[in-house]
Image (cartoon, rainbow, N blue to C red):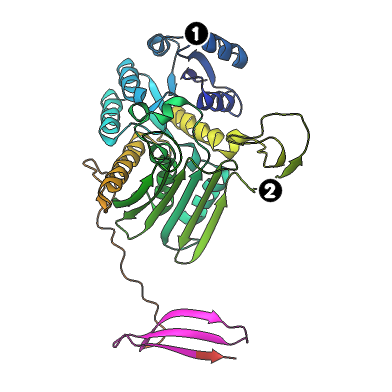
Amino acid sequence: MTRIALLGTGLIGRFYAQSLHGRRSRDRIHVVYSRSWDRAAAFAEEFGIPHDTSDWRAAISNPDIDAVVIGLPNHLHREVVLAIAAAGKAILCTKPLGINATEALQMLQAVEEAGVYHAYLEDLVYTPKTLKALKSVQAGAIGDVLWVRSREAHSGPHSDWFWNKDLSGGGAIIDLGCHCIEIARNFIGKQIRPVEVMCWADTQMHPVDVEDHAIGMVRYESGAIGQFETSWIFRGGMDLRDEVGGSEGTIWLNHWLRTGMEMFSSSTQSGYIAEKAETDTGWLFPVGNEGAALGYDDMFADVLGQMESGGRPQEDFYDGYVVNAIIDAAYQSVKTRQWAPVELPLWRGETGNERAGKSCSFDDEHDLIKKEKMPDGATKLILRHKQSGELSQRIVSA
């Protein structure tokens, strides 16, 4: 059994507690921290946690604790991680790892120098659909991954600190883009180096000093593109979608809206429907098991299982550091309106992954560009002459 100190009792802390005391019921939260003692006490009573505190240092120094789960605002991550590493405890930290790559690198170096287990709690790479899609991609089902589009959009975060740049580090990019960027990295291959970022962002709707809408592209050394779309201005719930385009196929994933359960209600009774749902009447999209659908269950199964076995989780602090570096480049691109390089002074992946040009030979003189069945039943070929580059088309059957 892993005895856990949970830091944070907000929405993310609630999801964590539900998963930790659910699927992996042998692991228990032993102490919970909240800035408000009353909130900590109420949370402890609800989830059957024996100890609660409003002092996070007391929580991490508890001698019975094996691991600390961090579900705190972004600006607190660095200080807390450094203290936990010094205490010699395993650390499981929510996204994003740091406010920027400099902070993230400091945290990575601290846990590695201390020799403590560390995991980056990026839940959306653990959704059941994503895990199955990743297996298909890794088995070569869609060929070389050329493009990944990941979108997360809703009407905005649930806590005030998200909207404060000093506390969050930014807006929709750092809040939601961290998910989208890491999803793309998993499909493209985390060993492939991200090279540069082009990003647009603006504050289109809210009276705040952080962006509430952004679209970006990350170019990888292989030539693959990871596209992220993030928004705090989307109305109608939470839109979580991914598309993966390969040389031999395509994968579409829809994680939240229109996933198979729809309900219409004109009742005057109200109740919780799903995260970020904006109404409880009319056409609704309930989610059967939010923890499973959002990846929390499989995430904790992986990170705690690997901790027990001495292995490495799918996501660790190094991954969080790379994501922060890409986000930094995105913000630089927003300022300059140009492609911005991804600065990675510590890179542990491969280099020289430039993808060679593809050639599909049709005969001694031609390469095949495209083969297509036409409405009349004929098969049309688009060909390119290998020497001259001249393009032509040919009907090969009727």
Q: Is residue 13 magenta?
A: no
| Quadrant, the C terminus | bottom right
Question: Residue at coordinates 52% horizontally, 12% vertically from top-left?
Answer: 40
> In the rendering, at what x and y percent does residue 209 appear?
36, 34
Q: Circle 1 is placed at which residue position?
A: 37
Tell which of 185 and 25 is nearer to you. Answer: 185
Rendered view: 51 above or below 132: above
Image quadrant in which you'd find residue 25: top right
> In the rendering, at what x and y percent does residue 6 appear?
47, 19
The residues colored magenta run 365-394
> In the rendering, at what x and y percent does residue 301 appear?
52, 32
Rendered view: 254 above or below 60: below
Disc 2, SS: loop
Q: Circle 2 is placed at which residue position?
A: 260
Amino acid type assigned to the residue bearing label 1 in the image: Trp
Tell which of 270 and 275 is nearer to you. Answer: 270
User: Can residue 93 be seen from the camera position used here?
Assistant: no
Q: Residue furthest left?
A: 345
